[in-house]
Amino acid sequence: MAEALLPDEEVGAQTRLTRAIAPRVKKHPGLSGIHPLEEGLDAFAARYLLLSMAEFTLDIQYYIWQNDMSGRLLFSALLEAADRGVRVRLLLDDNNTLGLDETLSELCRHENIEVRLFNPFSFRTLRALGYLSDFARLNRRMHNKSFTVDGEATIVGGRNVGDEYFGAGDEPLFSDLDVLAVGPVVGEVTRDFEGYWQSRAVQPLNSVVEVDKANGRDAVTLPTAWRNDPQVLRYLEKINASAFVQELESGDLSLTWAVTRLLSDDPRKGLGRARAKTMLPQRMMEVIGKPQTQFDIISAYFVPTRAGVAQLLSLVRNGVKIAILTNSLAANDVSVVHAGYARWRKKLLRHGITLYELKPHHAREPSHDRGLTGNSGSSLHAKTFSVDRKKVFIGSFNFDPRSAMLNTEMGFVIESEALADNIHQRFINSMRDRAWTLRLDKWGRVNWVEFPGEGDKERVHKHEPRTRFIQRLLVRLVWRLPIEWLL
């Protein structure tokens, strides 16, 4: 059931967020309020506005923070919050901080800002040297994404910080999903952040980069010339005109109240020391249980492995209908990872599993391939699944060996038939226009089918649409190599 988030002026001298949230939470004991952030602009606006409302603490954890327009806007907002006296703790995975040392060092000079890095590289420029000398550690990354303000509200989901995640460039590149949450689950996220912050896999920025703390006469500043860029001004105008921003500021933002639980990997996984029973796949099975009727999976990178395929086929034999949406080769930024999925397509289709592959946003330009590890520059970046139209998982976990065994991950399990059914309906209704439907022809070959419009005859592709021969050849070569555990 959805309810408006309304401010309460009678609560007393509390934070703005407390006045808005506490009375609503009190009416729903044991439940958390959830608001899905499906649109990139809304996802950015939520973070930007919450930063402006922060009064005590900001605990922020990300895998990627780009030094682009949206990244700079949020860096500036962090600094403004610190100037107001807010204690800022920023935890970043070091795999994607190349070129950010100067900015992070400047922020860290502020007395109210502390920056820490997960599995940091000793070599700050030639990072490949680090992989040569310390591959076992540096191959394990922190893929978590959380954004918690004053211990009252948090944003968790699939988005990193960057223009492509928020639709801040000329065109949005990613289809993604976060949720804004209030209520008891926020405390779980706060405690989980603390566990990571204190983890042995994490080091203070000043232990790997030289940082001189500022004194009273030496203010902390960031470059501001870029703020006058017409694109920045247009984006800020969009945010100010957003219905979401107006609803959040007026207190009319609707929330769905549901039992919500945080699942997060033990940060010792980043050092290869986590026990199997603490890892996310095992805990998801315990919390969610085995699907009985319907299992919908949306995963940017879907690498099921032999064991995963066996589990999916076992569900099918028990009468569970399974539908999977992942990136097509044309939309995928990491071709070699696509190989870990492509090798299993025929088997999945033969056993009645429905497969959809998302079309790229740009019809004429294939996605730029970012190599083995990639930066998730694909059309689809969401990681969510619904079970029996009753429970939903939304978070950072991809269905691949890297998420299962190497990277740390997190997400919410939300027990809400309304949210689960909404995801199922959007999944089914949007596939006709946005994805190719896969099926086997009479010779057992995979075909990609699209439906141009109402009344139009379906169009069938005999090989992966909008791809080059060399891409398809690379995929076929890679799926024969014993590297699935790396994908």
Image: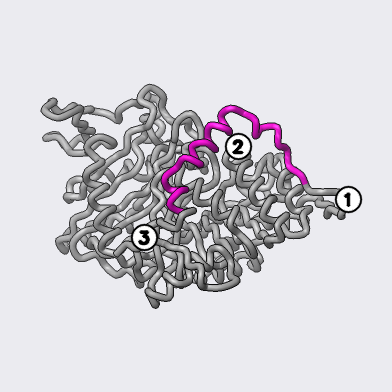
In this view, the mark in front (3 or 2): 2
Query: What residue would you read off at disc 1?
Result: 217
**For the residues bearing labels 2 and 1, Cβ distance under 8 angstroms:** no
> Is residue 232 depicted above or below 72 in this figure?
above
N-terminal of the two: label 2 or label 1? 2
Residue in the picture at 49% in, 53% down: 249
Front label number (1 vs 3): 1
Instruction: Give amino acid for label 2.
Output: Asp
For the residues labelled 1 and 3, the Cα–Cα distance comes to 49 Å
Magenta stretch?
A: 221-248
Q: Residues within 10 Å of mark 2 (few under 14, many from 20)?
A: some
Above/below status of 35 relative to 176: below
Q: Earlier in the sequence, mark 3 or mark 2?
A: 2
Disc 1 residue crowd, few under 14, some 14–19, many 20+, Cα 10 Å: few
Q: Residue at x 24, y 44 (%)?
A: 355
Mark 3 → mark 2, Cα distance in angstroms: 30 Å
Q: Quadrant of the N terminus?
A: bottom left
Q: Would residue 450 appear left or right of 358 to someone viewing this image?
A: left
Residue 348 lies, in percent from the top left, at 23, 48
Q: Which residue is mark 3?
A: 393
